Amino acid sequence: MIRRAALALRVLLGAVFIYAAYTKLRQSWLLFALSIDSYQLLPEWAVYALARTLPALELVLGPLLIAGVWLRYLSVAATAILALFFSVMVVSYFRGAGIDCGCFGVGEPLSLKTLARDGALLAAAIVLVVYARRRESKVQSPASSV
Amino acid sequence: MTVMRIRSFALGVLVLALGVAGSPAAQTKTTRAVGPVTAAVRIDLFSDFQCPACKALHEQTIKRVKEEFAQTGKIRLVHHDFPLPQHKYARQAAILAAAADRLGKYDVVADALFHQQESWGQSGNVDAVVDGVLTPEEQKKLREIAKDPAILASIERDIQLGERMKVGSTPTMIVTHDGKPNPVVGVVSYPVFSKYLNTIVGP
């Protein structure tokens, strides 16, 4: 049961990362740079660097999460990325910035709905981190008791 | 034969219409729209004079975009009023700016409204700000023009257009290139925005 739930979470998160990468890569990378720029948190060079690398990172992370390889590390990476997105979105939303979320390409305003969605994804990633750690400790415990 | 004649006539009317719209006379009708109508890139800017983010976008980015892209004929930039209901004096400011447009003074009035946004946003004394950049004669004309129901109607049309274009907040720029509209929402810096524009306007 727990394994099935973990599989479902892996597939969900992996699919979301793949879709997020697809929506960003099908348009000009500079449109995504503009979405990042509108958060007004990063200097120009960092805006370009993030706009260039983030979709590729999402595209790598997605399939690996679905495949379930290096889950202990990749679940932490997914959690870190989602936590970063979530915190930036929360700060911007409560600062009253009427901007695009930038989560899935352009045209989706930052709203309570996008916050709830990102928060749910973050929670799923955290659950996956806990699952991966427990699974690893179960695998290691018989050997350490010898 | 008759069908061919009708088609030729329709094509002629279309070409004539495009020709007139693209002529310098058509371009100087309003100062809210800058740049040739035939430009490959069109930016529809939906803005509210009382919104702080609109002020930031206007002062940091739009003024330079206008100078370096619209006035050089690379793009067409069209200002639309989108006064938000929570901004008490935004509609009044939009009416005065639209009236100033008929005097060819839109830029001067818009600059002043954004520059002094904090003061009139609190006091509600929008007229004083506008009067400060006009001659007494212009002020008198502006008052008359502002009473014209067509001014308010033009603002309502802008709001309706924004709603059709799914504008949810201000400032929003709809950048249309190759017939595809891309919304750019919020304050974006000139270096990043100009880099994007340079990739789509071509050489």
Image (spheres, coloured by chain):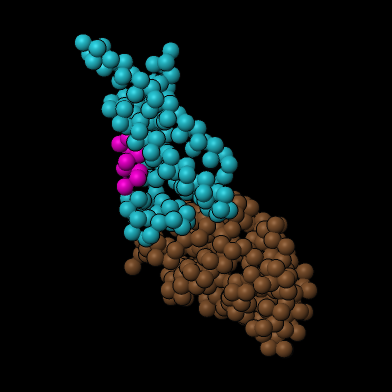
Residue A4 inside the magenta-drawn segment: no
Residue A49 screen position, x and y as percent: 32, 53
> Do we see residue B9 in this rendering?
no
Start and end of the magenta stretch? Answer: A53-61
Residue A98 screen position, x and y as percent: 56, 53
Asked whether B90 or A141 is in front, the reply is A141
Residue A91 screen position, x and y as percent: 51, 49
> Do we see residue A140 in this rendering?
yes
Q: Which chain is drawn using brown?
A: B
Q: Which chain is drawn using cyan?
A: A
Q: Which residue is at a point 68% across and 88% down the rendered structure image?
A: B135
Q: Which quadrant holds residue B123?
A: bottom right
| In the depicted structure, whether residue B80 falls above or below residue A74 | below
Q: Main secondary structure of the magenta part?
A: helix
Q: Which quadrant holds residue B195?
A: bottom left
Q: Which residue is at a point 44% across and 43% down the rendered structure image?
A: A85
**Would you say A86 lies left or right of B145 here?**
left
Q: Residue furthest front?
A: A145
Q: Which residue is at a point 59% across and 61% down the rendered structure image?
A: B46
